[in-house]
């Protein structure tokens, strides 16, 4: 009788421990090297009790535009008024939309980009940032990950 | 390395016990879900852009980024600065200053303001031009406070189909603050407007690289002097009881309750009284919507030149589910609290309704404290999903003018006035 109780107790314990270990195996203790989610804290600035209310320079992180003919023109001319992030933020836009966007910069905002360069910039944006062309870029992004 | 070792040691222990995972089938009550046994997935970054379909996320897909005086927010653009507020900050009626979204048009944003030099000027078609410093504004006028929602005209632009160029905001280009300052009317009265005054034009400290006479040089907005909203406008030097962050308009900002943020000039420094229509780009060309119900039109009608436009003005009624946000499962039978916010530029929100079947049946939610007609109003509702499955939670608000959120999308070339009923898929899992 005593032996049987002991055996049942032993079986129960084994089952409980096994269950716990399997649970742990599935749900606990997995880590992976990754920088994702990491963001540096900004150090506080020096303040003095004068009349000047100052903040630090606004940071501009590096940005990779797709490599290709016309990229340098985009970096020079578009960057005069705004960073190229204005381009990468957009959804894939139709070729005609990119053309009218660049023309808007010249006509509406007075960008005054030389005509040949304007055409180069339009061609670059159409070659990398339309629904047809940006898909390939997205695929490259997916593979790199 | 360490993780692998731990896994190995656990596997050896299992071996030692003489049990494999498949053997667990003998005790289903202890281990009901053994078939799905797998390592946890790696965390992946969100794709950096959406389209050509609509952005399906609540916020934009931008990365987190920290700008001066700001918590990490979602970076749309770095120069000029545009930052979106993450969803969870909208659990409360007031949005913290450090989390408040940011939108500038021109890259010459001040890095410093010297209050010894800075003046707010009222000039133009006036008998007594004014030049007041911040101390004058704080001492010589009676302070007034108003809770008001500031929403970017392009908020939720990434929902439109077909997609339109512009800031690809999710829903987080909005915020509510308690604004304290002086009445715009008092300033105008003090300056004594001359006969024939028609508009008040507002200019901040920001400037752009574009040539003079273009919208890329200065950002100017105007309000009709006969517009009753002028009686509610204040020039605010406090935002939630604190100085404004520079990126939100230090030292003072125009507050136009119920109106889109395009009129809320940041770093306001010039109020110019005009005796003629304001023909500048930011009034004549930009921030205009089709003169149709909801500002709705089609690409075809725009192409055909059929569209007459009017300046964008008041915020259409909107509401949002903030929590739960769909990122975690809810066990069936658990009573959770649905929480969110609602607002309208046409008057206070009087009703928020929630549907858990995609909009077939609606139940009224409980409204939170009333902070005024132009504030966010929080709402909540208990919800107990009985069985596992995928639920489509929808939320709609109605304001005191009886405007209710429609379930149809809106489209116009500027990507403005989106206020369709929002939906959130919630996954309910087995609780046993």
Image (cartoon, coloured by chain):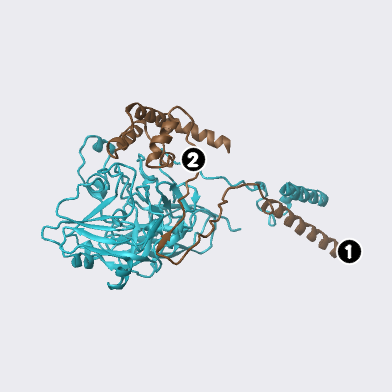
- Residues marked 1 and 2 touching at CB (< 8 Å): no
Give the structural element (helix, strand or loop) at label 1.
helix
* Residue indicated by mark 1: A3
Q: Position of residue A89 (x, y in %)?
A: 43, 42
Q: Is residue B39 shown left or right of residue A136?
A: right
| Residue B262 place in picture, x, y as percent | 30, 53
In what quadrant of the picture does the C terminus of chain B appear?
bottom right
CA gap between label 1 and label 2 equals 73 Å
Q: Color of chain A here?
A: brown
* Rendered view: B329 above or below B209: below
Label 2, on which residue?
A: A63
Q: Chain of mark 2?
A: A
User: What residue is shown at x 38% (from left), y 35% (from top)?
Assistant: A77
Callout 2 secondary element? loop
User: Is the same chain shared between marks 1 and 2?
Assistant: yes
Image position of A94 with respect to B87: above or below = above
Tell whether A70 sits left or right of B284: right
Residue at horizontal 38%, vertical 47%?
A: B107
Question: As drawn, is B54 to the left or to the right of A17?
Answer: left
Residue B326 visible, this angle: yes
Q: Nearer the viewer, residue A29 or B155?
A: B155
Q: Residues within 10 Å of mark 2 (few under 14, many from 20)?
A: few
Chain letter belonging to callout 1: A
Residue A1 visible in this rendered orientation of the protein:
no
Q: Please report whichever mark, 1 or 2, sits nearer to the chain's N-terminal start.
A: 1
Residue A43 coordinates in the image, percent (x, y):
54, 58
Q: What is the quadrant of residue B232 in the picture? A: bottom left
Q: Is residue B42 above or below residue A141?
A: below
Q: Position of residue B7 (x, y in %)?
A: 74, 49
The chain whose colour is cyan is: B
């Amino acid at each position: 009788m005593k032996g049987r109780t002991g055996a049942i107790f032993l079986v129960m314990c084994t089952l409980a421990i096994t269950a716990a270990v399997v649970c742990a195996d599935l749900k606990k203790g997995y880590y992976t090297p990754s920088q994702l989610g990491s963001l540096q804290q900004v150090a506080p600035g020096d303040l003095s009790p004068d009349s000047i209310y100052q903040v630090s320079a606004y940071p501009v992180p590096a940005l990779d535009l797709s490599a290709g003919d016309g990229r340098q023109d985009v970096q020079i001319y578009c960057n005069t008024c705004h960073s190229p992030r204005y381009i990468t933020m957009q959804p894939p836009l139709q070729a005609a939309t990119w053309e009218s966007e660049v023309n808007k910069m010249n006509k509406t905002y007075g960008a005054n980009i030389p005509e040949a360069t304007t055409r180069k910039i339009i061609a670059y944006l159409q070659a990398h940032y339309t629904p047809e062309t940006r898909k390939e870029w997205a695929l490259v992004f997916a593979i790199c990950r | 390395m360490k993780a692998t070792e731990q896994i190995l040691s656990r596997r050896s222990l299992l071996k030692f016990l003489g049990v494999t995972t498949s053997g667990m089938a003998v005790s289903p009550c202890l281990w009901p879900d053994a078939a799905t046994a797998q390592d946890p997935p790696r965390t992946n970054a969100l794709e950096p852009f959406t389209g050509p379909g609509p952005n399906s996320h609540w916020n934009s897909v931008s990365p987190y980024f920290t700008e001066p005086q700001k918590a990490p927010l979602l970076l749309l653009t770095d120069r000029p600065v545009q930052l979106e507020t993450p969803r969870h900050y909208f659990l409360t009626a007031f949005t913290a200053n450090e989390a408040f979204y940011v939108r500038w048009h021109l890259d010459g944003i001040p890095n410093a303001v010297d209050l010894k030099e800075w003046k707010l000027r009222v000039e133009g078609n006036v008998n007594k031009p004014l030049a007041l410093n911040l101390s004058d504004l704080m001492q010589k006028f009676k302070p007034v406070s108003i809770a008001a929602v500031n929403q970017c005209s392009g908020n939720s632009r990434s929902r439109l189909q077909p997609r339109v160029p512009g800031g690809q905001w999710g829903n987080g280009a909005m915020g509510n603050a308690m604004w304290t300052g002086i009445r715009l009317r008092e300033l105008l009265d003090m300056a004594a407007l001359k006969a024939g005054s028609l508009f008040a034009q507002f200019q901040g400290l920001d400037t752009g690289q574009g040539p003079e006479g273009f919208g890329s040089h200065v950002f100017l907005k105007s309000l009709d002097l006969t517009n009753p909203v002028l009686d509610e406008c204040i020039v605010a030097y406090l935002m939630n009881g604190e100085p404004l962050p520079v990126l939100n308009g230090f030292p003072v900002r125009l507050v136009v309750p119920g109106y889109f943020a395009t009129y809320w000039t940041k770093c306001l420094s010039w109020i110019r009284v005009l005796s003629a229509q304001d023909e500048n780009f930011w009034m004549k060309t930009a921030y205009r919507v089709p003169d149709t119900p909801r500002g709705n039109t089609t690409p075809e009608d725009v192409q055909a030149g059929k569209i007459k436009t009017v300046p964008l003005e008041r915020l259409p009624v909107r509401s949002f589910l903030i929590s739960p946000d769909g990122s975690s499962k809810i066990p069936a039978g658990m009573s959770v609290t649905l929480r969110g916010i609602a607002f309208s530029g046409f008057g206070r929100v009087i009703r928020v309704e929630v549907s858990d079947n995609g909009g077939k049946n609606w139940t009224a939610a409980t409204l939170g404290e009333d902070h005024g007609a132009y504030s966010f109003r929080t709402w909540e509702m208990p919800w107990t999903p009985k069985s596992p499955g995928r639920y489509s939670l929808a939320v709609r608000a109605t304001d005191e003018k009886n405007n209710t959120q429609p379930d149809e999308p809106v489209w116009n070339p500027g990507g403005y006035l989106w206020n369709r009923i929002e939906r959130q898929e919630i996954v309910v899992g087995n609780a046993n």
